[in-house]
Amino acid sequence: MSRELAGAAAYRVRQFFAAVKAGSLSEADRALVQRYLTPAQLQLFERMPANDQQHAIAVASRLLDWGWHDQTLIQAALLHDIGKADGGLNLAYRVAIVLLRAFWPAGLEWLAASDTGWRRPFYIHHHHPEIGARLAAEAGSSPRVVELILQHQSPANTRGESGELVALKAADERS
């Protein structure tokens, strides 16, 4: 097993256990979310399962720790995975997605091509940036928040990306 694959596997194992033990938000987490999100955005945030909420808070907190305090970027961090909220992405699907991405990417692409039946969660996972961007726009988010959500999973292109997008991607990868 390559060093890179081993590192990715270890990260996913940690992420798995964090998802299993995810609980309700702390008062500090609630304060952070309420400080940065509008009421309509907060309604979106509350649609996410607890583990996705905690991941979003971890991404936002990492950005704040790195010195990024722009409201637009923190809103995007808190909402970047909102497109997954209603997609049936339970833990079994998430594990399957990680394994398929590592060992059979073409199979994952095939599964993500249909938005019906048992393949729908694969579709949702693949298209969650577009779905999330649409939901954020419908909730009145700024065009920049919408664009950051839309691009947060795009292939790395640091030469043409804003510093905000590079930071969001890095915080998402490390959280």
Image: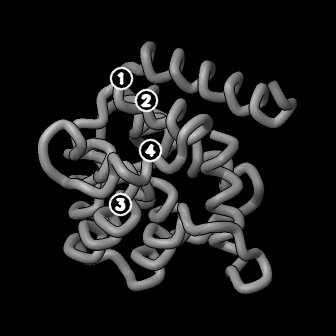
- Which element carries disc 2, helix, strand or loop? helix
Label 4 CA crowd tier, 10 Å (few <14, some 14–19, many 20+): few
Amino acid beneath label 3: His
Q: Position of residue 87 (x, y in %)?
A: 23, 44
Q: Contact, CB < 8 Å: mark 3 with mark 2?
A: no
Residue 89 versus residue 117: which sits nearer the camera?
Answer: 117
User: Residue beneath label 2, please?
Assistant: 96
Amino acid beneath label 1: Ala
Of the numbered discs 4 and 2, the one sitting upstream in the chain is: 2
Q: Contact, CB < 8 Å: mark 4 with mark 1?
A: no
Please tell me in which quadrant of the rendered image residue 14 appears: top right
Q: Position of residue 44 (x, y in %)?
A: 25, 54
Q: Residue at x 78, y 29 (%)?
A: 7
Q: Contact, CB < 8 Å: mark 1 with mark 2?
A: yes
Label 1 CA crowd tier, 10 Å (few <14, some 14–19, many 20+): few
User: Residue beneath label 4, please?
Assistant: 107
User: Residue beneath label 3, please?
Assistant: 127
**Mark 4, mark 1: which one is toward the viewer?**
4
Q: Position of residue 20 (x, y in %)?
A: 43, 15
Label 3 to label 2, Cα distance in Å? 16 Å
**Mark 3, mark 2: which one is toward the viewer?**
2
Left or right side of 115 for 2: right
Label 3 to label 4, Cα distance in Å? 16 Å
Amino acid beneath label 4: Gly
Of the numbered discs 3 and 4, the one sitting upstream in the chain is: 4
Q: Residue at x 40, y 85 (%)?
A: 143
- Which element carries disc 4, helix, strand or loop? helix
| Mark identifier at residue 92 | 1
